[in-house]
Image: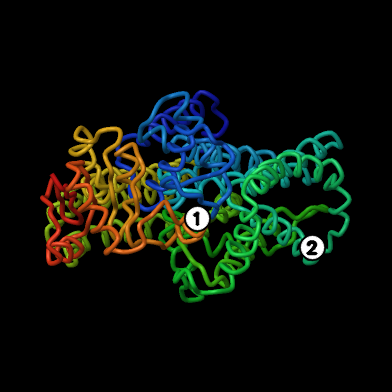
Amino acid sequence: MNDLYNSKKFLWTLFALFALIWLYVLGIRSLVPPDEGRYAEMAREMWANGDWITTRLNGIKYFEKPPLQTWMNALTFTVFGLGEWQARLWTGLCGLGGVIFTGYAGSRVFGQRAGFYAALALGSSLFWVACGQIDSLDMSLSAMMCVSLCALLIAQRDAATPTEQRNWMLVCWAGMALAVLAKGLIGVVLPGAVLVLYSVLARDFGIWKRLHLGKGLLLFFAIASPWFVLVALRNPEQPHFFFIHEHFERFFLKEHHREGAWYYFLMLLVPGVMPWLGVLPQALLQSLRRNEGRFQPKLLLLIWFVFITFFFSYSSSKLPGYILPVYPALALLLATYLESASRLNRLIAAGLLIAVGVAGLAAIPQMAQMAVRHPAERAMIEAHQPWVLTAAIIAAAGGALAALHARQLRRDLTVLTLAIAGFCAVQLILIGFEPYGKMRAGKELALKIRPQLGPDTPVYSVGTYEQSMTYYLGRTVTLVDYWDEFTFGLRQQPELSIPNIDAFIVQWNAHTAQQVKAMAIVSDDAYEQLKKRGLTMRVLAEDTRRMVITNL
């Protein structure tokens, strides 16, 4: 049982089961705001209005990010119709593709067993699995950067033929172009900086002659440039906002209120890399050793991890998903270490997973405290507890079984058991979140009022924007006294919103006088404020976080 990677029948069976579960769970949860609702709604609007150049959210120009994710989601809606698994399909395929490509690169560069381990490590890492099930840009960017990294490793390995080197470098350039279309300039800046640092630290300046810069740059601009040109021609205000505000100002300034401590991403890495935390320090240390040959792939992977982590740690804008692109590099480093890891170190990894499972069991009674701000949601969190309990048991049991395999020197079974335990535990935690996620999305509220909406029924959102509710309503709303991420777009088209409560009350009263039915999504506080102003309204539907009112 120490040569599982040599059995094609076993590998194809394992992959089929993994892919089936990975893709099936995409459709069993509601789209949780803000990210999932936002990117699903942007794609729905693109699909509905047929404009594939100017990206919009709630009908308002929205240029914070490039369009790759929106394009792919809109294409999925075109082929398969609207739905939750459709909204997550591109993200799911990106996560799944990253696992496949990382495993393939590992087998080509480090050997078949390392490739097997790399796929297992990435496909079970908590953060990669979780992000692969969420409709967000981070996985789209990370998958495209994974293509660039893995193609570079395959192209630059010492055994690569000239033809292989050229073809894989073109794949690398294409990956960077798609990464730019996924999330902007970091798609090329980060790989470029890593390459500069690698060539200096490895003293491998000859790598610049092996990049096929001429053909690569032509391919890069052929893929990345057309949309930027077209969107700028239609929207002259877009280039300054996207390149200056969204890149430089967002990186250096704190206006987005997303700053965090310098160790923010290091703290996220601890749970994010589970169940492999027990061997991560050893894998990083091993990567410092120089290998024989011209190209030093482990050093490149280490620089990829360290630089990207440092880059986002320095940024004034920090969100958890920013660190996701380092996980394929970590999976490859873990794989090369696990090949030669001692029994003691494999036992440490298994023991740590047991400890995490036990800690999870101990923490379950404290989960209800999460509902302090919204006591009415306590039942939803309590409904999540059995799922977390099962996940903790699987983690602890998986760790114990892996420890047994480690003691018996069954290397492949040890790694496989850790991977299966980690993957299953994450899936259970995600699935059990659905009752709470459905409430966060406002899905039931939207489905209740949707039959009462006519094609011309005015719908307002007062002092807030419910990212997922608009998707489930299947239509845009008129914002009232709300700017936030819409500030830039509303400066271009101020007529698309109502700037303050007073103007809204005038509009609402006009609807009432004309016997035109209108609806509004409001918070409890906004409802009390409107009530004090004597607004004619009745509650049509409500949940623990918002209510829908009507005037008739």
Question: Which of the two discs, 2 and 1, labels the residue nearer the N terminus?
Answer: 2
Q: Which residue is the site of mark 1?
A: 489
Which residue is at the far front?
A: 514
Q: Is residue 464 above or below residue 109?
A: below
How far apart in space, not on screen, are marks 2 and 1 (Cα)?
A: 46 Å
Q: Amino acid at mark 2?
A: Ala
Q: Is residue 455 above or below residue 488?
A: above
Q: Amino acid at mark 1?
A: Gly
Quadrant housing the C terminus:
top left
Q: Nearer the viewer, mark 2 or mark 1?
A: 1
Asked whether disc 2 touches disc 1, contact meaning CB atoms under 8 Å apart, the reply is no
Q: Badge 2, how many Cα within 10 Å: few under 14, some, many 20+?
A: some
Residue drawn at the location 49% of the way across and 46% of the way down: 56
The image position of residue 350, as x and y in percent, is 39, 54
Q: How is the image coloured?
A: rainbow
Q: Looking at the rendering, which quadrant does residue 522 occupy?
A: bottom left
Residue drawn at the location 47% of the way across and 43% of the way down: 123
Residue drawn at the location 60% of the way across and 50% of the way down: 332
Q: Badge 1, how many Cα within 10 Å: few under 14, some, many 20+?
A: many
Q: Secondary structure at mark 1?
A: helix
The image position of residue 243, as x and y in percent, is 65, 59
Q: Which residue is the site of mark 2?
A: 202
The one of 356 and 289 positioned closer to us in this rendering = 356
Whether residue 128 is visible here, answered yes or no, is yes
In this image, 547 relative to 352: left or right?
Answer: left
The image position of residue 50, as x and y in percent, is 51, 32
Q: Secondary structure at mark 2?
A: loop
Residue drawn at the location 85% of the way across and 44% of the way down: 212
Q: Looking at the rendering, which quadrant does residue 159 occupy?
A: top right
The one of 528 and 355 positioned closer to us in this rendering = 528
